[in-house]
Image: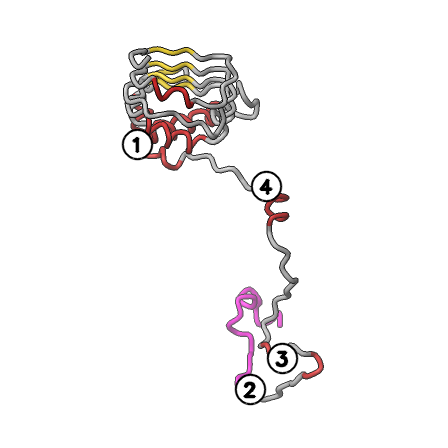
């Protein structure tokens, strides 16, 4: 078993890859059309250069790429088509070529040895852009407002007031009356600079 170099595990409804530990010499691994999600864990496969995970249930891109960088250092060909983590029109009609290109820059920033990503060869320009801007191409999902409001503990309603705390009690009000030496004539007001003297 350890000498097997190629494995094809498509359409087997895999949820776990625990059994791959015995295939330490794998070079190609096809895992298309399974049920693999964000909890995907590959064993260390130092010789693996080709990995396809098309049409699975992967939604979180960054955690997957960090894991792949650690366990498959020789990876040169990766395909993630058909997963939500790969933004293209196959998955969502709202995504366009710009979304997909940003995704490519981010993947190439994380996996610098890739030569092919999905169906396209990695170009020199893409590699240069990934080096410069790849780290900023991460897609950040907004938090669900309903979920965050439900999870947040109910805080007592507080009204802002500029008054000191001692003066907030309406039954203990103290006022201050005084005189000011400064008299405001309004001649330095911005609103008065367009008014002529004969209009006053």
How many angstroms separate mark 2 from mark 4 (CA)? 53 Å
- The residue singled out by tag 3 in the image is 167
Q: Using the image, determine if residue 30 lies above or below residue 145.
A: above
Q: Using the image, determine if residue 155 lies above or below residue 15.
A: below
Q: Name which quarter of the figure residue 24 lies in.
A: top left
- Residue 131, label in figure: 1
* Chain part drawn in magenta: 182-200
Tell me if 112 is positioned left or right of 65 in this view. left
The question of residue 35 being in magenta is answered with no
Q: How is the image coloured?
A: secondary structure
| Position in image of residue 11 (x %, y %) | 51, 12
Q: Depth-wise, is mark 3 or mark 2 nearer the camera?
A: 3
- In depth, the one of 171 and 178 nearer the eye is 171
Task: Point out the image quarter for the N terminus.
Answer: top left
- In depth, the one of 176 and 39 nearer the eye is 39
SS at badge 4: loop
- The residue singled out by tag 2 in the image is 180
| Position in image of residue 131 (x %, y %) | 30, 32
């Amino acid at each position: 078993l350890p000498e097997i170099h190629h494995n094809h595990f498509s359409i087997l409804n895999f949820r776990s890859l625990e059994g791959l530990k015995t295939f330490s010499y794998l070079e190609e691994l096809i895992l298309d059309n399974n049920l693999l999600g964000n909890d995907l864990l590959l064993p260390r496969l130092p010789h693996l250069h080709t990995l396809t995970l098309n049409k699975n249930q992967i939604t979180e891109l960054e955690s997957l790429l960090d894991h792949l960088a650690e366990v498959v250092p020789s990876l040169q060909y990766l395909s993630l088509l058909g997963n939500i983590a790969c933004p293209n029109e196959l998955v969502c009609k709202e995504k366009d070529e710009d979304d997909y290109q940003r995704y490519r820059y981010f993947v190439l920033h994380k996996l610098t040895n890739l030569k092919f990503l999905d169906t396209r060869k990695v170009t020199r320009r893409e590699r240069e852009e990934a080096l410069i801007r790849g780290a900023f191409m991460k897609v950040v999902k907004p938090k669900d407002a309903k979920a965050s409001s439900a999870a947040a503990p109910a805080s007592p309603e507080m009204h802002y007031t500029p008054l000191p705390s001692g003066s907030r009690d309406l039954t203990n009000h103290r006022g201050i009356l005084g005189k000011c030496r400064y008299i405001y004539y309004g001649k330095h007001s911005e609103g008065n600079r367009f008014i002529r003297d004969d209009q006053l």
